[in-house]
Structure formats: structure tokens, C-alpha cells
Image (spheres, rainbow, N blue to C red):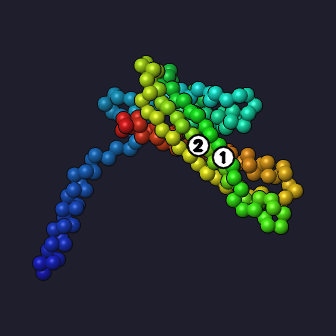
Amino acid sequence: MSLASIRIAARLVAVAALAALTAGCFQPMYAAHTDGTPDLREKLLGVEVPPLNYPNASREARLGVEIRNALAFKMYGNATGMPPTHRLEIKLATNHSSLIVDPATALPSIESYGINAQYNLIDIASNKSVMTGSTFTRVSYDIPGSYQRFARARAFRDAEDRACQEIAENIQTRLASFFYAGT
């Protein structure tokens, strides 16, 4: 054997040894704890998501309900959790723009819709903020012809729903990271 092949073999043995040493350190994020401490699922069950404060029958109120329901399903699996230990407050801002405009009719054929969300996790016992953050999403949708206004309205609503699901997913992922790592 040459000196180069011995060095490569030594490096492979070192990598395998390090991998074997760290293999026991892995623990799935949502796994149940055997030491009696609450697992991530139980911590997420303690997050209360109150209704967003927007005027009734407004577009933002509909988005707030959609995001709140998506978060509840992702965190609890149903409509309610355990007695709350934290409260999650969310504020939304939306934007809407035309991406491609048909030169013959001057009407948009593809539009973009976006939601910016700011969220604040508050510890109920101390009424102090323990985590703040923001997230955003942008989705596009096609407008099927200039005279199909109901199809356009439905495409817009579907884009809103997709954006709400992405916002809820981003917030839930950040909450899981906070409760798992504590940061």
C-alpha cells in the first residue's frame, strides 16, 4: 500500500468514528421525551392564536381566519389546544401587482399577490414578548381572459388561500424551532 492510500483510509476511519460518536445525539424534533419534560407537540398545544383584529367582512379578516385555522390545524391537529401558556399575535399587510400585461388589451394576464406577516409570541404568565418575527410570501396566478371576471376573482381567492397556507407554515416552523431550541 502506498502512503497516499494509507492517508485516505485513515481519514475514512476518522470520519466513521466521528459519525459513530455523534449518532446517539440525534433526536427527532417531534419525538416524545422519556425524561418527563414536555415534548414539542405539548408545547405547541399551549399556544393560543386569538382572532386577528380586523373589521368584520373585510378581506384581511378573511385572511386572518384562514391563517388562524391553518395554524391551529398545524399545531393542534384540531380546533383547540391545551390551556394556553403563550399567545401569538399576528399582523398582516398585503400587496397586489400585475406581472404581465397583454399589449393588445392593456389588461393583466398574470398577477402577483403577497402577504407580509409580523408575529409576536407572548408568555401569558409574565405578559412579556419571548419571540418576534416576520415572514412573507408571494404567489402568482393567471387571469384566464379579459371577460371572465368570475374566473379572475376565483384565481385571486385561490392565490390568497395558497399565500395564507404558506404564512401559516412559516410561522409554525418558527414556533417549533423556538420551542425546540429555545431561541
Query: Dot 1, crowdedness within 10 Å: few (<14), some or many (≥20)?
Result: few
Q: Secondary structure at mark 2?
A: strand
142 w.r.t. 34: above or below = below
Which residue appears at 81% of the width and 61% of the height? 106
Is 142 left, or right, of 125 in this rendering?
A: right
Amino acid type, residue under disc 1 in the picture: Asn
Image coordinates for residue 120, horizontal then vertical, percent = 50, 32
SS at badge 1: strand
In the image, residue 56 above or below residue 149: above
The disc at residue 95 is 1
Residue projecting furthest to the right: 147
Q: Which mark is residue 116?
A: 2
Q: Which residue lies at the image location 69% right of the left edge and 33% below the top edge?
A: 61
Q: Which corner quadrant holds the N terminus?
A: bottom left
Q: Is residue 11 visible?
A: yes
Picture coordinates of residue 55, whole percent (x, y): 71, 28
